[in-house]
Amino acid sequence: MDKQAFINRSNKGIVVIEGVKLDIKIYPDKDGDEFISIDMFPITPLHLPTQLGGKWLKYTDENEFLSFESEIKKHRERAEDFYKKAQRIVKATIENGFIKIIELPEEVKQDFCIWETEEQNQNAIKRFIKRPHKIARINDNTIFALGNFALDIDGVVYKPYWSYWLDRPFYYFEKEK
C-alpha cells in the first residue's frame, strides 16, 4: 500500500488489512502537523488491543507505507501461531512459592528443541522440568508466562495472553471461567 492508499484508509473507522482490524487515524497535532495513530484490535481472544505507535506523516517515508501490509500480515501469522500453541496445557503445582512442572506434553517439549544435537535438546527439556520456576509478577494478579502454553496449577488453568508491550506472554492469576 502506498502513502496515498494509506491516507485514503485513515479516519474511516475500523478497516481490515490482512485480516486484522485496525483503526487508522490521521489528525493534526497542536502545531497543525499531521500525526498518524493506529489502533490494532485483538487478533485472537488471547491478544490484547494495542496501539502501533504514532508518527508524524511528514517524517514517514514511502517504504514504511509499502511494507505496512506485510508487517500486519506477520503480526497476524505470529498471533495465530501463538493462539494455537496456547491451547496446550502443562500441568504444574506451586511448591515453596515456585512453579514446579509436573507434566510436560510432547508437543510442548518440541519448543525446547532448538539446539544442534538431540542430547542438547533433551538436556534443555530436563532442565526446564527439573528447575523450580520463580513466579515473576508483573502486578498483583499477573505473572510472566513460562512459555506459549496454558498452565494447569493444581487443577486451575491459566491461559497465556500476549502483550505487544511486554513482547511476551503473561498469565492472569485469576480463575478462568
Image: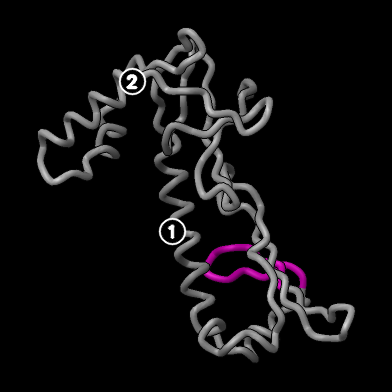
Q: Is residue 163 above or below residue 61?
A: above
Nearer the viewer's eye, disc 2 or disc 1? 2
Q: Residue at x 40, y 16 (%)?
A: 100
Q: Nearer the viewer, residue 148 or 121?
A: 121
Q: Residue at x 54, y 82 (%)?
A: 64
| Residue to which mark 2 is pinned | 131
Q: Is residue 96 above or below residue 28?
A: above
| Callout 2: SS | loop
Instruction: Assess disc 2: are there few (<14), some (14-19) or many (≥20) residues with their C-alpha within 10 Å of its C-alpha.
Output: few
Q: Is residue 114 above or below residue 3?
A: above
Q: Which residues are magenta?
A: 13-24
Quarter occupied by the C terminus: top right
**Residue ranking furthest to the right:** 30
Place of residue 43 in the rendered image (x, y in percent of width and height, measured from the top left): 57, 54
Place of residue 163 in the rendered image (x, y in percent of width and height, measured from the top left): 58, 47
Cα gap from disc 2 to disc 1, whole angstroms = 32 Å
Give me the disc on residue 97: none
